[in-house]
Amino acid sequence: MTLKHVVSIAAAAALCMTLTGCSGQTASPSSAPTPAPTPTPSATPSPSFSCTAALVLAQVHQLFAGQDFEAHYLTIGDKFTLSVWLVDPEIDPATPLSGMAAADRQALERGLSISYQVVDQIPCAQRVFDQVNPMIVDGRFQHWYKDFLPVSAFVGLHEPTTDDLIAAVEATGTALEEPRATVPQSAQTSAASSCGWSEARAAIHAYLGAEANTAAYLIIGARLVAPGNPTPNSPDDVGVEAQWPVRDTAEAADPLVRERLDHVAEALACLWPAIDSLEAFVVDPAGRTVVYAVVPGSVIRARAIPLPPGGVRIYHLKPSAQP
């Protein structure tokens, strides 16, 4: 994404530059290797307390327990980023034109609120992360609001209103992304032998395992990979993002990345609405992005497993970027 520092980009090559450069190229046979009651604020950790991304992630899972969400961390450009994808059940997936302004405000409020909660309720977040990436979708997983907000904007605030949060973010020089601009599409009848996101997501998580810092989420209509290739049955682009960690560079080699992409793609082949793109992020134990991969939806829809060599783009990122 090309947004401000966004996870997805207009083209895979552009994303490599956004994520601080690629050392690899398109993969080929010759390639190199988401409101629960707010908990009582925690005490500020002492200087001797060890704040880690893994600790913050575990506390994020406690903070949003009971809600439909995904959370993970990675580097985006030179920013160490905590991403939170959250389903807001208060937003009507069939919002009419007359309700767009209220729904947009709701999505903006929720995105700012969860970002503030993370910084306010988890003191270590201030020490570890540069920015929070809220992604708000409705019950049909349609995009409403997605942004990159500096952690520093929320430090020191006390019971802020939404307007207070907006002002705090803008005071840092960060321009807020606009919420959804178009009326959601009507729900479509699912195709035969299709599966919903809940089923596909469960299969992906079952394969990736319970290891920390894994994630899989669906966003419809956010143009995750522009220009995209929407199918005739999918008025909005259907984009899935997945992330998994590796212990060392050997686990980030093309054959192993391809093997995992095969399994994720297999879980997504039955997805309805039909998938348009899969983006995968492979991170090291410190959360540094070491591999970025894109699989076009057309390849996944064709159920060609293993994925054809020419249909997958895999980029190895330079290890120079530090959180």
Image (spheres, rainbow, N blue to C red):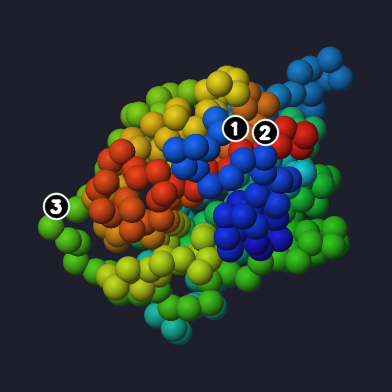
The numbered disc on residue 288 is 2
Give the left or right position of residue 254, taking residue 192 as reference: right
Amino acid type shown at disc 3: Ser
Q: Quadrant of the N terminus?
A: bottom right
Disc on the earlier residue, 2 or 1: 1
State which quadrant residue 316 falls in. top right
Residue 85 position, x and y percent, is: 52, 48
Q: Judging from the image, what secondary structure is the residue with disc 1 in?
A: strand
- Toward the left, the furthest residue is 192
Vertical side of 187 occupied by 47: above or below: above
Whether pointer 3 and pointer 2 mark residues with C-beta atoms closer than 8 Å, the reply is no
Q: Disc 3 marks which residue?
A: 193
Q: Which residue is mark 1?
A: 283
Task: Work out whether residue 74 can be spotted.
Answer: no
Mark 2 and mark 1: Cα distance apart in space? 5 Å
118 sits left or right of 63 in the view? right
Locate residue 162, reporting x and y percent: 69, 62
State the image coordinates of residue 68 (x, y, percent, origin top left).
Answer: 43, 45
Q: Is residue 101 visible?
A: yes
Quadrant position of residue 307: top left
